[in-house]
Image (tube, rainbow, N blue to C red):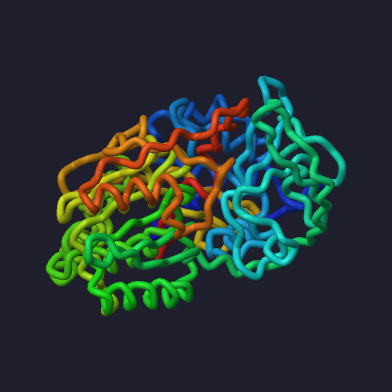
Amino acid sequence: MLVIAAMAAAACKDKNDDHEGYDRETVNSCIYEIMGTYYLWNNQMPQQRRLKFSDKPDAFFESLLYSDDPWSFISDDSKATNAELDGNPYSMGYSPQFWYYNGTDNVLIMVEFVYPGSPADRAGLKRGDIILDIDGEAMTPENYHELYSKTSAIYTLGTYNAEKNELVDTDTKLKMEAELVKADPSLCDAIFNVGGKSVGYYAYGAFASDTSYFASMDDVFDRFKAAGVKDLILDLRYNGGGSIITAGHLASAIAPASVVSNHEILVTYVYNSILTKHFKTNLKGKELEDEILYRIPSNSHNADIENLYVLCTNNTASASELIAIGLMPYMNVKLIGSNTFGKYTGMFIFDNEIEGCEDLDNWAILPVCMKYANANGLTDFDKGLTPDYKVEDDLLNAYPFGDANDPMIAAALDVIGGLPLTSKAASVHPFTAIKRDGSAIGNNLIIRMK
């Protein structure tokens, strides 16, 4: 996207590190100017005279946010943030769900999936495993994120005994040390035979911005095309979002060939009044179009899919929701699962690598800078997208990705085959999911600035 460097840099002063290694007023002044220019709700920001530029940058940033904005966030480690967005995090290599146990403040982790070759994979951690404690310390609302973020730890696994309604320590201990993980989001693909026709299945973990991962996606869709797949089950149940470029590449692999060749509109962007006026005043033709809408790009690996069945949960957010609504005007799209997260906004990332933002030091800010709508104007789905077929995900009795016995996959196959939905009730258990933080990196649509 266009960088309005002069506007963003107006208050960035010469660096003068204080005892924390940076000057708070310098960083905060830069944050204030960026937010005043790019933030979608800049007209809701408090008056400058009421702000404390001497606050820590994270507190200062939070003080600028619109009360109905749960998504914008700030990081004190821009390099780590960019690595996670790229899909190359320094981590154990598994995707967690955090739950409260039995009406208490005790927290446990259920494993959504594990990246192949990661420390978690080598240690033997699997999808559906329950983590009871880390380094022998029970998890609570106050410490679970800190424990989960350890770079070296011993994990204690357990199981749930439904008859006794209790967690059981299995005496299984897994030692793991974090490392740079190549988190290829292509988790699993398969082809099912349903009534004599080939049905594709593709589990996609995150819209990482590292385009080197496109190769594995391309291979999958080449296989689908060769097999004559016209019905695709797209498993986005744990995909919280990510790069618009990656979302566009996936959309162009799926969409009908005519839609791709015509470069139809995937989504349009709505900005604040300052950016809208700037774009319309200074840009013409294609330059202006590139700033206000995103068209489906060309893709030589397009599989020309006709029917799309998206597996979704409350953890399906942002770019994942964009895929679903963006393709709805052009093909048959059905949602199978539970209501999605409900995030129809996108953000730029600002760090010291962006011209005019050098004084952010090691901080990175990701404010909401636009909302998106599909070609028919669908947006503002703050309660999430409602599934066409309601099916509960069941991590307690998890099947591997691509297994036809998985309740959500089985439901999709029934719908495609014209059969009544396979009825399988989700496990009854005393766990309550801790709602995923709306401002987490994984729940956001990221649009890299040009």
Q: Is residue 232 left or right of residue 111?
A: left
Residue 77 x, y percent position in the rendering: 67, 54
Q: Nearer the viewer, residue 265 or 108?
A: 108
Residue at the (15%, 72%) spot, across then down: 261
Q: Is residue 434 left or right of residue 264?
A: right
Figure disc tally:
0
Tell me if residue 405 comes above or below residue 181 in the rendering. Answer: above
Residue at the (72%, 44%) spot, across then down: 131
Residue at the (46%, 57%) spot, across then down: 403
Q: Nearer the viewer, residue 143 or 357?
A: 143
Tell me if residue 111 comes above or below residue 165 in the rendering. Answer: below
Q: Nearer the viewer, residue 395 or 206?
A: 395
Residue 191 x, y percent position in the rendering: 35, 67
Residue 229 x, y percent position in the rendering: 25, 68
Which image quadrant for residue 345? top left
Whether residue 48 is visible to the viewer of this picture, yes or no, is yes
Q: Split into 4 quadrants, where in the image is the C terminus?
A: bottom left
Q: Is residue 396 left or right of residue 248?
A: right
Q: Nearer the viewer, residue 51 or 396?
A: 396
Q: Residue furthest top?
A: 103
Whether residue 6 is visible to the viewer of this picture, yes or no, is no
Tell me if residue 104 comes above or below residue 87 in the rendering. Answer: above
Residue 355 x, y percent position in the rendering: 50, 63
Q: Split into 4 quadrants, where in the image is the N terminus?
A: bottom left
Which image quadrant for residue 125? bottom right
Q: Is residue 445 left or right of residue 154?
A: left
